[in-house]
Amino acid sequence: MQGKDHAPGLKDVAIAANVSLTTAGNVLRSGAEGQRKHFSEETALRVREAARQLGYNPNRAARAMRTRESGVIGFVSVNYSQKWGTVENYTSFPFLVGLSHALVPSGRHVALVEIDELELDRERRLPNALNECFFDALIVHFGLSPIAQHLLGEFKIPRIYWDSGIFKKSDCIYRNEKRISSLLTERLIGQGHRRIVFSAGLGLKRYLSKKATHFSFGDRHQGYQEAMEAAGLRAGVLTGYHPEELARQIASQKATAAVIQGNTDYGVILQALMILGLRASEDFAVLACDVETGTINRSGRLCGATYNRYQVGKVAAEMVMKKLESNEERVPSYEIPIKFSFDHPPLSLPSGIGDGDLER
């Protein structure tokens, strides 16, 4: 029984299990799938039972001094909100959970680092958490400004870019947002819709004024526009997030369908349709570029391009561990496969729709 002032160490575990210090350390550090093990299962069980009975917890600080690794992966994200106390970029949680679930078995953990793009423009320096070189590797999320990309590029630390508007052959995870939007628009056109609008929220104003907005907005808008032009149809947009205003815009454009961003703006679209006495799917087609499948969807049967961020987080963990464990400078990029969920039949369009006020 250990005294209150003496926390059990690795040496205590080794003695209790009757193994060498090296073997005890190897057993307690093992756990990643596919990791090569130099000990028997019987030895592993004996060591783990000794550690459990002694109440042993690894000293991460001591390990970091010995291995020059902290065991911490930094998740670098951006919050573009200009209002203190509000968060715009909140869709990354399923990714973080998947990332953590895949890292923890190998003894690694995730820590969040937020970059304030607006402050970065003024200070021209990254957060102290990055400057202190605490992390073994970084996973960088969101469309970074040129300043942020330049500053991050100065760090000699392994990095994986997820959903950041960087499309290189190595170290990146991304979706083809332009292709997704184009395919969704083409599907609606194939169903006979001619008055299809693009739900822009506040993104269009930001995008056109070259202010901070995620790269996917521009790609999706471009894919939608190109599909409409190819069909000889005029593009239309819905702007803002007020249901009454959106209802007015839908009615004025005589829209019968919309390509929207995702779960975040689906709720307000539903409210706008209710004001007009319309039902999503039954009376008005809605397809989303981003249907999160890594969480429970409580906003109704949203259809479109699916995105399982939980699984993508696990992919990111595999990529970063490969860089760390094999000392590979680069790993091949991963383009997220395009998948769709259409769980209801095409709409029966009202008579007269198809000749199209929005045809060019």
Image (cartoon, rainbow, N blue to C red):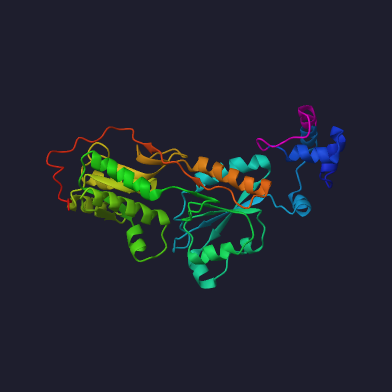
- Front residue of 272/15: it is 15
Q: Is residue 246 above or below residue 105?
A: below
**Residue 152 position by quadrant:** bottom right
State the image coordinates of residue 7 (x, y, percent, origin top left): 81, 45
Q: Is residue 267 visible?
A: no
Residue 34 location, x and y as percent?
Answer: 66, 35
Question: Closer to the camera, 345 or 270?
Answer: 345
Whether residue 244 is in magenta: the answer is no
The correct choice, above or below, for 149 with respect to 39 in the image is below
Q: Give, as a single range, the part of the protein colored magenta.
A: 32-46
Q: Residue furthest top?
A: 42
Residue 297 placed where, x, y %? 41, 39
Quadrant, the N terminus: top right
Name of the residue lying farthest toward the bottom: 122
Look at 38% across and 48% down and name the residue there.
264
Whether 124 is drawn above or below 34: the answer is below
Q: Residue furthest front?
A: 169
Q: Magenta part mainly helix, strand or loop?
A: loop
Residue 255 lies left or right of residue 45; in this view the side is left
Residue 39 lies within the magenta run: yes
Q: In the image, what residue occupies the spot 73% across and 41% down?
A: 29
Is 184 placed left or right of 310 in the picture? left
